[in-house]
Amino acid sequence: MDDIFGIPTQALLGQLLLGLVNGSFYAMLSLGLAVIFGLLNIVNFAHGALYMVGAYVAWMALEYFGLNYWWSLALAPLIVGAFGVLIERLLLRWLYQLDHLYGLLLTFGVALILEGLYRYVFGVSGQPYPVPDALMGATDVGFMILPNYRAWVVLASLLVCLGTWFVIERTRLGAYLRAATENPRLVQAFGVNVPLMVTLTYGFGVALAAFAGVLAAPIIQVTPLMGSNLIIVVFAVVVIGGMGSILGSIFTGLGLGVIEGLTKVFYPEASATVVFLIMAIVLLLRPAGLFGREK
Amino acid sequence: MRRHGIVYLLGLALLLLAPLVVYPVLVMKVLCFALFACAFNLLLGYAGLLSFGHAAFLGSAAYVTGYAMTQWATTPEIGLLLGVAVAALLGAVFGALAIRRQGIYFAMITLALAQMVYFFCLQAPFTGGEDGLQGVPRGELLGLLPLSDDSVMYYFVVAVFVFGFWLIQRIIRSPFGQVLKAIRENEPRALSLGYEVDRYKLLAFILSTALAGLAGGTKTLVMGFATLTDVHWATSGEVVLMTLVGGVGTVVGPVIGAAIIIVLQNELADKVGPWVTVIMGVIFVACVLAFRRGIVGEIAARWPGKSRG
């Protein structure tokens, strides 16, 4: 079996894997958006910019401090998460009583500021980031040659996503979080520090974006604009999946990545727009999204 | 009402005399974006719908007008009409999809659909890709008036703007506009009063996109080009910012906001480069945090006895 529908199997599987890699980023980012939206009722437009900042933290750590990939994987989410806590404490907390649209507009402004600053410092050309030594090369798994780093990205993001799911759905902390999503006043009345939870949730959500940014750094060129292109696709993913369900976000993200990858094989011209087309179809058939419920 | 009339007459007189003191092309650009912002404000300020993809309509009309003028050598009014028609058609399709969801989802859907238009313009064979359409001729209006003359062009743009501005006023003050406001204030109640909310929203969306198209087509005539910037999400963000700075839901706010942002960009672009984006972002954050009524909204709120329009 050397080809499927006239496409060489190796190319097809390669694109499938690439699709899964992209899907992992969609999954991690839409998961972060969903967690933040659940508790803060804010659609975090700055999510793409913070993903970009995460990638740059990794690049700067290597370039200026000689800290390797694994350090960055741990440090970038912490740094960006702390930055997120600052954003929440200084800016977002004034908006909770207002229309949700203001949250979107404010975070859009934050995204513009971050993007502009990074463009000023680094210019628009991309910075290459090396694949870590341990994950160089490829493994022959019989039916295809599997590039190690890409496999690692899919594995790592799946672990992080499922870990998030476990914490939110299966632990006491997650129970508080879900309760606060439903009714923050009541949860606060029970003595849970809801404002602290809100702050940490935002920090966690953007830390997830930074983690995705570090994972992405060795695959794509690190540029100041890498986030804004991605975030719009992620918005479409979120509309398709609905923000109500965690597993739904993960599944939708991965699925759309794979579909996008396959489109690259069979009809490359549409690969940039296929997610948006699917969004339009889903809106026609299931306006609330695949896993959504109207709020 | 009388005071409004005097303010408008003063504004019009200023517009007619402006080319004596200011570079006319800059004023024309401001007027195009002012019309764009007014069209956007019709949707956000009066129907409560935040479209984050309005550049798609500005841009598609800009491309269509530019293409008609260069390839088919149409007269400018036909080029503009074609642009408006395409923008309205696109608005009908996108609007029908986007109104299926509310609030924050509406914004995300319009943004995503507009991104589709961006990729289409990037790849389509007739848009000139990264270069865009360059050297679009202005032609002769009705085959009579040579728009290549900057002062003729200027008064044509003023006429287009005044027409668009008047139309939006007319829409807002009509019974239709009142229903839109009712939907903005309380959608379930409007629904329970028997208004077909979705049809009102869709019509408002189409009107807004058609006017955005008019602005886009006129902009192509003024500048002589249509590029990917016109359909980029940053332009969608700019129109939100213009409206926010001037005052959401005020009649003249978007005009003032557009003037401020365009002049600011014009002044800063050469001097500070990428900082322009940062400054725009800071204005966004400042407006949302401390200045949500915008300039005109703040003045109206502090001017006792003045009715809010």
Image (cartoon, coloured by chain):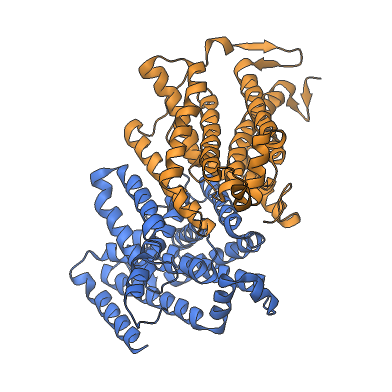
Residue drawn 40% across and 45% down?
A90
Q: Can you say which quadrant of the picture contains the C terminus of chain A?
A: bottom right
- In the picture provided, is A140 more to the left or to the right than A66? right
* Horizontal and vertical percent position of residue A50: 47, 36
Q: Is residue A64 left or right of residue A249?
A: left
The structure residue drawn at horizontal position 69% and vertical position 28%, both measured from the top left corner, is: A16
- Which quarter of the rendering shows the N terminus of chain A? top right
* In front of the other: A257 or A244: A244
Q: Position of residue B135 (x, y in %)?
A: 37, 55
The residue at 68%/47% (across/down) is A244
Position of B29 relative to B273 (above/below): below
The quadrant holding residue B222 is bottom left
Residue at 66 percent across and 22 percent down: it is A155
Q: Colour of chain B?
A: blue
Q: State the residue lying farthest toward the right.
A: A1
Q: Which of the pair A244/A201 is nearer the observer?
A: A201
Query: Colour in which chain A is shown?
Result: orange
